[in-house]
Amino acid sequence: MDGAKKKADDFKHIGNILCDVLNTFRNDPDLELAGLFSLWDDVVGEAVAKNARPAGFKGKILLVNVVSSVWIQELQFYRKDMIGKLNEALGKELVCDIKFKIGPV
C-alpha cells in the first residue's frame, strides 16, 4: 500500500507543470514590458491612443491593435520614433520593433 501512495505523491498537478514550463521561457523584461500598458497614452499621445492599443508581446516585438488600415499606414511612419519614446519611458531598450494589425482598441 505504501508503494501506491508514494507513486501518487510523485504526480504533479498539470497547472504546476505548465507554470514551471512557462517560467523557463519568460524573461525578466516581461514584467517591465507589462508596465508599458500604463504608459501608452502618455507616450503616444491622445490621438494615437484613441486609435491604437498595445495587444501583447512576441519577444521584444510589441503587437499593437489599430482601428483601420489608414492608421496602420500612418503609424508606420512614426514606428521608430514610438520605439524610442517607449524605451525611454521604460528606462531600458525593451521594445525592438512594433507590429501593427487591425483589431479591437
Image (tube, rainbow, N blue to C red):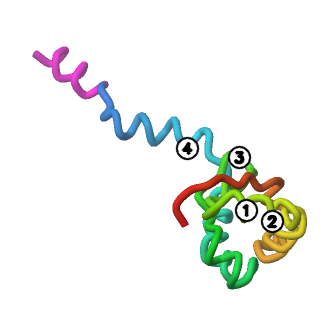
Q: Mark 4 or mark 1, which is nearer the start of the sequence? A: 4
The image position of residue 94, as x and y in percent, is 78, 59
As shown in the figure, which amino acid type bears the numbered disc 1?
Val
Q: Which residue is mark 4?
A: 23
Q: Mark 3 or mark 4, which is nearer the start of the sequence? A: 4
How many residues crowd mark 1 within 10 Å: few (<14), some (14–19), many (20+)?
few
Tell me the distance, in whole angstroms, between the alpha carbons under discs 2 and 1. 6 Å
Q: Which mark is residue 33?
A: none
As shown in the figure, which amino acid type bears the numbered disc 4?
Asn
Quarter-wise, where is residue 92 in the image? bottom right
Q: Main secondary structure of the magenta part?
A: helix
Residue at 78% of width from left, 77% of height from top? 89
Q: Mark 3 or mark 1, which is nearer the start of the sequence? A: 3
Tell me the distance, in whole angstroms, between the alpha carbons under discs 1 and 3. 26 Å
The image position of residue 18, as x and y in percent, is 43, 37
How many residues crowd mark 3 within 10 Å: few (<14), some (14–19), many (20+)?
some
Tell me the distance, in whole angstroms, between the alpha carbons under discs 4 and 3. 14 Å
Q: Secondary structure at mark 1?
A: helix
Residue at 35% of width from left, 39% of height from top? 15
Q: Which residue is mark 2?
A: 74
Assign the N terminus to one quadrant of the image: top left
In the depicted structure, whether residue 20 falls above or below residue 11: below
Residue 6 is inside the magenta segment: yes
The image position of residue 63, as x and y in percent, is 67, 54
The image position of residue 88, as x and y in percent, is 84, 74
How many residues crowd mark 2 within 10 Å: few (<14), some (14–19), many (20+)?
few
Q: Which mark is residue 59?
A: 3
Q: Secondary structure at mark 4?
A: helix
Circle 2/circle 1 CB separation < 8 Å:
yes
Q: Which residues are magenta?
A: 1-10
Q: Which residue is mark 1?
A: 70
Q: Is residue 30 left or right of 77 when viewed as pictured?
A: left
